[in-house]
């Protein structure tokens, strides 16, 4: 759809996804908390094109977005090794990069092709088709077009929507650090810049459990930033954790105890295996584990924190990691 227009479309499509077991390498086992240790991982699905930004909707269903525009919904029992169904829930008609749902089941999608965030409502009609209504939610700041929103997260207590604006891979870099982090106030619809035109490809972001801190992966600087509020809605930025090796962090998710999972991205030409790091709430390294593919494009925890979901681009796969409870 053209920016500024509302589209309504209907589509149908589903596929069966079988889970397969893969052995996962574990480093430094014996951790406390919900992310204590990794047991085995399973392939939740292999797609024709890469998927990214896994997230759970308010009904508990798992969603991803594909590079060709589809929003996939996975149905089935996440706690059993059975077949899952992946059906097309919606389509951004562009190049989606980030996906998040509010408590009413409305999807917010970062789309690089349209350089905007879309608001998508999708409902199933009586004839079994999925009908969607798509509207641009935000596409510019002070009459300047975004480079291309990348990732987003939503505050469940205040409704604040946080997102990174990085443009396509390589557009904001060490040589051209023009990436930004924004917040949208739901009551006033004001767009608030947390960091404007100064970052080298800001990518994934996540909120701390108390929602006082926002973690941002600045990929090209190979580091995690923390924006802390003091007083509320006045943000101060500092380096939370400096990584080394590989290209840089691309995706984040936070456990209820404050531990931070970090996708440490690299290109498949450089290394065959991917790596996810675990940091505590003080930014201290706890452990890491391997993923069969280094181009990790999304992380999320299941609502009960029994599983870590990982999207990986080079294998066009979605993985599930059981997390051992202690």
Image (cartoon, helix red, strand yellow):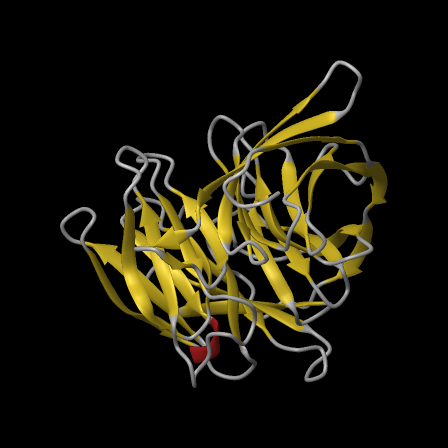
230 to the left or right of 71: left
> Which image quarter is the N terminus in?
top right
Q: x%, y% of residue 133?
A: 59, 30
Q: Is residue 208 above or below residue 241?
A: above
Q: x%, y% of residue 188?
A: 26, 36
Which one is in front, 180 or 214?
Answer: 180
Which one is in front, 98 or 46?
Answer: 98
Please say whether residue 123 is visible from this viewpoint: yes
Q: Is residue 90 above or below residue 23?
A: above
Q: x%, y% of residue 313?
A: 70, 64
Residue at 56% in and 34% down: 6
**Count of numbered tags:** 0
Residue at 30% in and 44% down: 210
Task: Please tell me in which quadrant of the rendered image residue 279 appears.
Answer: bottom left
Which one is in front, 143 or 171?
Answer: 143
Q: Is residue 238 above or below residue 222?
A: above
Residue at 79% in and 20% down: 128
Task: Please tell me in which quadrant of the rendered image residue 97 appears.
Answer: bottom right
Q: x%, y% of residue 127?
A: 80, 16
Q: Is residue 55 above or below residue 289?
A: above
Most extreme residue toward the left, as rendered? 231
Please say whether residue 254 is visible from this viewpoint: no
Residue at 80% in and 32% down: 12
């Amino acid at each position: 759809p053209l920016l500024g227009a509302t589209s309504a479309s209907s589509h149908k499509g589903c596929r069966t996804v079988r889970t397969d077991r893969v052995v996962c390498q574990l480093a430094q086992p014996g951790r406390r908390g919900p992310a204590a240790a990794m047991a085995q991982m399973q392939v939740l699905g292999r797609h024709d094109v890469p998927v990214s930004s896994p997230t759970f909707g308010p009904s508990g269903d798992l969603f991803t977005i594909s590079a060709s525009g589809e929003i996939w919904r996975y149905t089935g029992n996440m706690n059993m090794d059975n077949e899952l169904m992946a059906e097309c829930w919606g389509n951004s008609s562009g190049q989606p990069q980030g996906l998040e749902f509010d408590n009413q089941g409305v999807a917010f999608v970062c789309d690089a092709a349209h350089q905007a965030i879309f608001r998508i409502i999708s409902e199933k009609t009586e004839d079994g088709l999925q009908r969607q209504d798509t509207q641009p939610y935000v596409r510019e700041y002070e009459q300047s077009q975004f480079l291309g929103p990348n990732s987003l997260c939503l505050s469940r207590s205040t409704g604040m929507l946080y997102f990174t604006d990085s443009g396509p891979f390589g557009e904001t870099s060490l040589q051209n650090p023009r990436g930004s982090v924004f917040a949208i106030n739901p009551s006033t619809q004001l767009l608030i810049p947390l960091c404007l035109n100064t970052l080298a490809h800001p990518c994934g972001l996540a909120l701390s459990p108390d929602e006082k801190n926002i973690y941002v992966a600045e990929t090209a600087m190979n580091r995690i930033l923390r924006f802390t509020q003091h007083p509320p809605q006045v943000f101060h930025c500092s380096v939370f954790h400096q990584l080394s090796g590989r290209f840089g962090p691309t995706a984040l998710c936070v456990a209820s105890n404050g531990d931070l999972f970090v996708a440490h991205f690299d290109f498949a030409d450089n290394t065959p295996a991917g790596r996810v790091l675990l940091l505590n709430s003080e930014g201290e390294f706890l452990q890491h584990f391997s993923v069969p593919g280094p181009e990790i494009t999304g992380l999320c925890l299941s609502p009960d924190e029994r599983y870590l979901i990982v999207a990986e681009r080079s294998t066009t796969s979605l993985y599930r990691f059981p997390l051992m409870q202690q």
